[in-house]
Each structure stands twice: as structure tokens, then as C-alpha cells.
Image (cartoon, rainbow, N blue to C red):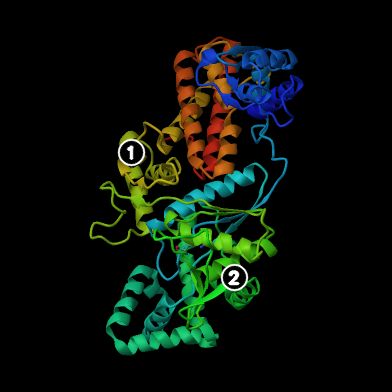
Amino acid sequence: MNIRQLLDSRVSQALIAAGAPNNASAVIKQSNRPEFGHYQANGVMGAAKQLKMNPRELASKVLEALELDDIAEKVEIAGPGFLNIHLKMEWLSQQLELALSNDKLNINQVDKPQTVVIDYSGPNLAKEMHVGHLRSTIIGDALARTLAFVGHKVIRQNHVGNWGTQFGMLLAHMNSLKTSGEELSMQLSDLEGFYRDAKKRFDNEPEFAETARDYVVKLQAGDEECLALWQQFIDISLQHCDDIYSRLNVLLTRDDVMPESAYNDDLADVIKDLDKAGLLTEDQGAQCVFLEEFKGKDGKILPAIVQKSDGGYLYATTDLAALRYRHNTLHADRILYFVDARQSLHLNQVFAIAKAANFVPQETQLEHMAFGTMMGKDGKPFKTRDGGTVKLIDLLTKAEQRAFDLVSEINPDLSEDERQSIAHTVGIGAVKYADLSKNRSSDYIFNWDTMLSFEGNTAPYLQYAYARIQSIFRKAGKIDSSVPIHLNEPAEQQLGVKLLQLIEAIELVVKDGTPNILCNYLFELAGNFMSFYEACPILKAENDIKNSRLKLAKLTAKTLDTGLGLLGIDTLDKM
Ligand code: ARG
């Protein structure tokens, strides 16, 4: 059930009955003050303007036409023509009962399910995953979960980089180690170090650099021995990614990997078809696409290069091929790219070219869900103490360690195993939530202390709120489900309305790719619960009231668990 949607359709109907045009919209908003009711309809003023009518006059006509008795206690005209809607508590409590007895909280599936491709994570397999991949992986995954929850068909695509010149030097290094008899998977267990060594040799040993370049040519020509070596490297590197994904509780599996190399055979056709569409221009031997809409500061068009003068293809060429695949084979209605904001020109050029060349139809939604850089406390890009990139695996280990120390301090009596398991859930949850709760498009300052705090808008705070409710149930025993929910106290009413608003947060996440809206909702919900818990004793209350309050607590726990689940964060019964 979606209150906002329901009110929207009822009030819009009344607006039209009162003479407003057929496309008139009720503009329903949650009220921010209880005295203004629970919801406000702000659409009367706009409609009155169109009708050249006094807005308060139109508002009273709308009131006459409005059929809301089943849902609302009263509807008042306020200010220049707002409608303040006070919901009926009996109706609300019925809705709460429905949410409680339904495993999806009685949240409707969307009317028009779309096929949504989500491009996220996409690490470069030449190196180990580092903090730069964290945001894409976490935010993209939250969207994959949330879109699926409301009924869209989600196809995850992990566009990993596994092709290109770097692999020449890696293969050369691999081969020389192999011929000197060293154990390969051991060598590759530290991918980062392996890359560094290969690079050092590439820069300092001319003979090695020569071999490396040979390997690139051989690889691209499909030389079998070379491909086998490359495949071996890719497998080990992907295993590193899988370890991270499972540690992070991210949905990505091997089935979602659609690497750059998968598009190799299509690249020549992409160029051919761009040419046919009249979009190619040769510039200093390279094939480029010039589109008016992309201009630099100097007013000159910024070209997108799709083929180098030596015939080699580029990142953009592969992305165009990927778009064709996503349209022709995956039948995507909407494609979301969770990619660093610094790639915004690249992606927008790719989108525009794909549409200009008719690789995808105009109506396909192509959206760059850009995010800012992860910064250290000093406001500079997050680095190790000696200025290197931070390996993701090290960051996660540290998060778990810090959480372990914290849990041991609060709960020294729990067994070591229990504390380890709690530390995993809290530590990983904290890292993910800290990222998800920030406005995606800004840079984000990584701070261990705030993310692991039990106060404020953090995962531990929400996990703790959930665990606290579970502890109430351990004391309360069974709920008598035949006793209805009563919403008498203001704190009960406020919590009751809030509990039914999860879907409104989800809708915004789905539309804009902004999980921070869901985080905010959960934080407010936990706050409402805490106020309720203080104002309305549960265990000490009389039988019926006690049951009703236990039901509210139960639905709060269920909503927190569902909401955190959409963010890919687990809850705990004990902390
Ligand atoms: N591999 C790229 C990188 O590390 C990210 C891939 C993003 N997806 C895409 N379709 N371009 O920057």
C-alpha cells in the first residue's frame, strides 16, 4: 500500500471534477509538522492559476468533490489553498496489520516492470580491487536489490577491464616466472605486488618491454598459448573479486561478469555502422565522432575517439558495443551506470553517439549515476600512509577489526566466535552504510570513528535499534495477533504513519538512484521508534495495549530489516 499514491489519485480526481484540466496533479507531500496533518496536497494553486481562479475557491470545490472519508479524519484548507490531510487512525491501523501479515510489508509491485541493466563494480583485472571500486560496488548493489524488490527485472553487468596493453607486461612477467619454475598462484596472491614488479621491469628492462609488446600483439591476434596464460591470470584475478563480493555481501557472481574482451568481435562492426550513419570523421589518422553538444571551455567540440591511427580500439568503442548488446540481446528499457563522476564526459558521449547512430532507441533510458571521490579525513583522495592506493581487502579487514574491538568492549562476555560474527556484520555494514547514506554525487569523506559510532545516522545505530527490539521480544514472549493495533498516543501515531512510508522512500531511490533517501528514512524510523519506546511503555502496559505496542515494535523490526536488506546490510538479534 502506498498512501501517497492513493491520495494522489483521489485528490487528482477531485481536482478534475472541480474543473481542473485532465492532467492536473495533486502534488502530495508528507507534512513536516503534525498540526498540518499527515499529508498535504499542494496542487490546487497550480490548477487555479491555469483556470485563472481564486485558489481558495477552487480548494473548497475540490473539498466538495473529494471522496476521502474512508481514509481521512479531516481535510482542511490552509494558507493560499493547501489541503491538509489528517489520516484516520482506524484505517492506518488496518494498513499496519496488512503490512505485518505480508512478507513484503504489503508493498505493491510496479505496474510496468522494466528490464533494467545495472552496470556496476567493473574493476580492472590487471590490479587488485582498491577503494576506488567501493562506491560503485556498494551503491550499484543497493539499486540492484531495490529495483528487484519492487518488481523490475534487474540484469547485473560487471564490465570488468580484462583487455589492453597492460596485460602484455603481466603475461610477459608471468611467463618468465613460470619458465623459472615459480608457483604461479602464489605469485598472484598479491596481485598488486605482481603488477608493480611487472611495471618496474617494463620500465627498466628494454628486452622485457619488447617481449611485453609482443605479447599484446599475440594476445590480440588470438594466439592460443598466450590466451591460455591470459585466461589463467583473469581467473585468479576474478577470484580476488569474488572474495571481496562475498565479504561485502554483494550480489555479483561470475554470471554477471561481462568483460571488455567479450565485445572484441563487435568492435569492427561498431566502426562500420558509425561510418554508415555518417558519424565518423578522421582526425590525425584517428576515427572520431564530433557531436555539437560536447564542447570544451574554448568552444571547440570535444571529439570521442573510437579508433586509433594504428587501428586499435578504445574504451568508448567497447562501451558502444556493450550498449548494442544491452539493447539487442538483453532488451534493456533502462541502463544505469554506477561510474565515477570523472567519467561523465565519456559516458555522455557514448550515450549520445549510441542514440545518434540508432544503436539504441530514443526511449531507452541511459543514466550515468555518477558519484564523487572517496576522500581521507584530510580532504584529499583516500591513500595509504605512504601515499599508495588502499587495497579493498585491507580496508574491509580493518573495518572488521575495529568493530571487533568495539564489540569486545561493550560485550566482553560473548564468546570469541560470537564477537567475530557480530564484528563482521557491524564492520561491513558500517562501511557500506557510511557510503550509501551520503549524497552520491558529492565527494565523500571516509571516517572510521563516525561510521562505527552508535549514535547518528550509522549502520551500528540502526542495527542496534533492531537488536533492541529483538531483546524486547525475548522478554515479552508471544504476541496475541488477534488484538488489533491501537494508535492512541501521539508517538504511536507518528510511528504508525512512518512505518507505512517505506515505499515512498523506495520510489525515490528507484527513480534517482539515491540510496541515501532510504538511509534517511530508516534513521528517522529508528528515531520515531526510540521516541515511542520512551513515551509508551511496552512490557509494563496492560494486556491489549501491550499487544498493540508489541505489534508496532514487530513491524518496526521488520521494516528496519527489509530496508537494511535493500541496502545489502544484515541485522543482528544480539549485539
Ligand atoms: N573498468 C572501468 C574503470 O575501472 C569501469 C567500467 C565502468 N563501466 C563501463 N561500462 N564503462 O574505470
Q: Earlier in the sequence, mark 1 or mark 2?
A: 2
Residue 570 seen in this snapshot: no
Vertical placement of 55 versus 110: above or below? above
Front-most of 517 and 194? Answer: 517
Residue 312 coordinates in the image, percent (x, y):
50, 80
Query: Which residue is drawn at the image coordinates 63% and 16% (left, top)?
Result: 54
Q: Residue furthest left?
A: 386
Q: Which mark is residue 71?
A: none
Q: Is residue 110 above or below residue 176?
A: above
- SS label for mark 1: helix
Mark identifier at residue 450: 1
Count neighbours of disc 2 (C-alpha within 10 A) and say few if under 14, some if 14 to 19, many if 20 or more: some
Q: Is residue 181 above or below residue 104?
A: below
Which residue is at the front of the view, 382 or 395? 382
Residue 507 horizontal/vertical position (percent): 60, 38
Quadrant of the rendered structure where residue 439 is?
A: top left
Type of the residue with mark 2: Leu
Instruction: Quadrant for the N terminus, please.
Output: top right
Q: Residue at x 58, y 22 (%)?
A: 497
Quarter residue 414 falls in: top left
Residue drawn 48% across the image and 83% down it:
310
Where is the C terminus found, in terms of image quarters?
Answer: top left
Q: Which residue is mark 2?
A: 279
Residue 94 relative to residue 456: left or right = right
Whether residue 440 appears in this view of the structure is: yes
Between marks 1 and 2 in the image, the one whose residue lies nearer the viewer: 2
Indicate yes or no: mark 2 CB to ligand 1 under 8 Å.
Answer: no
Image position of 156 (left or right of 114): left
- Please provide percent x and percent y for residue 398: 33, 51
